[in-house]
Image (tube, helix red, strand yellow):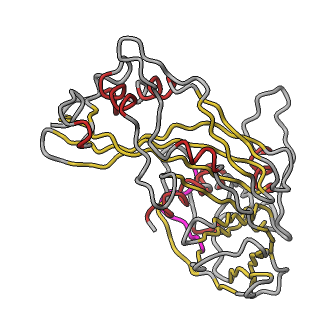
Amino acid sequence: MRKRLALLFGFIALVSVFVTCSTDFELNTPQETTVVFGILDESADTQWVKVNKSFLGDGNNFEYAALNDCTEYSNVTVSVEENGGLNRLWTLSEMYVPVDNSSGIYYTDSQKVYYFIPGSLDNSVTYTVKAEFDDNRPVVEATTSLVGQFDFTGIFKAKLFTGLDFENGTGLASPSYINNFLIDWSLGEDAKRYDLTIRFNYIEHTIAGAITPKYIDWFQGTQIASDITGSGNLDRTINTELFFQFLQTVPDLVDTTGIDKRVIGNVEFMLTAAHDELNTYIEINEPVSGIVTERPTYTNVTNGIGIFSSRAKVVLDRASPLTPLTQFKRNSTEEMSRGQYTGDMLFCSDSLAYVGENYYCN
């Protein structure tokens, strides 16, 4: 649940860019606009939707933006309906969540969100979110399908059966990195955008005795599918030397003050797929780099604005359910512990296979 809240906060920070005002001020427009944002995520246990209102005031809108009580409805019921399958219907519950306002002007304390816990979602059907009011105004609604099944290919998984090679063994004096390490995956129906991240896990031991699991995410960029039929594959080829160079740029790793050792952990490959409509929304709202700063408004919400769409995530942390978590092989482990880029970061291995090696954790 804590992880889902963290993802929610990041999403709220992205989408809460609509200027609002308080009903305590005189309004310069008689009609507010209902704003809906919701991304269904099959990999999450809890699903979130944000519903609020947006309008302009006659005073300083930067001041109004910090007042969240005027942007929230007290007369709305939010629901999500399953169209097909079990035809389930969920009435969403309310929750106030804290807001990190360190880098923006919107909301100074907390804001209301809506959530439900479906147990599971069915990617063979569609889902409709509805915001219904008690004053007979039109229902605000939007419908989305889910992202179809996708996964890393069997050929890529087979690479991980005996461990992960990012350095293939000519020794520390002349390391041999892999410049064509291929990661490929199958596509999901209705999915357009794929983000690939490699997560390196480790356990940090301080001189004071604290033991803390940590990780570093190495983002591998975005790939766009040519269509949304779910047929074919996408891939990413990396130069593994860049991984060790990337770790050298992470301040928390470079700083070894108070650190006794860092025990090398497993590696995860994480792939997130965004629905076609969500990809369109993201692309339209990306920072403008050209001379023309105006951009079109994109919404799939009826009687309101915003986006209701879906995404899904696949995490590969082992070659199969019967194999251990994916670990670096011997040469990569030695490179991590004693190599030219990360040799000063106090990495070591606690694997009994390396007892007697100078990179074994004492």
Identify the residue at the far left of this view.
Answer: 208
- Asked whether 151 or 295 is in front, the reply is 151
Q: Quadrant of residue 258?
A: top left
Q: Is residue 190 left or right of residue 323?
A: right
Residue 263 position (above or below residue 337): below
Q: Is residue 224 magenta?
A: no
Residue 23 position (above or below residue 327): below
- Asked whether 340 or 28 is in front, the reply is 340
Image quadrant occupied by the C terminus: top left
Q: Is residue 261 left or right of residue 217?
A: left
Residue 109 position (above or below residue 196): below
What stretch of residues is rendered in magenta?
A: 105-114
- Asked whether 113 or 342 is in front, the reply is 342
Residue 255 placement (x, y as % from top left): 29, 28
Identify the residue shown where x is 41% and y is 17%. 170
Q: Is residue 30 visible?
A: no
Q: Is residue 106 magenta?
A: yes
Q: Quadrant of residue 171?
A: top left
Identify the residue at the far top of this view.
Answer: 173
Residue 133 position (above or below residue 156): below
Residue 105 placement (x, y as % from top left): 57, 48
Residue 8 placement (x, y as % from top left): 55, 60
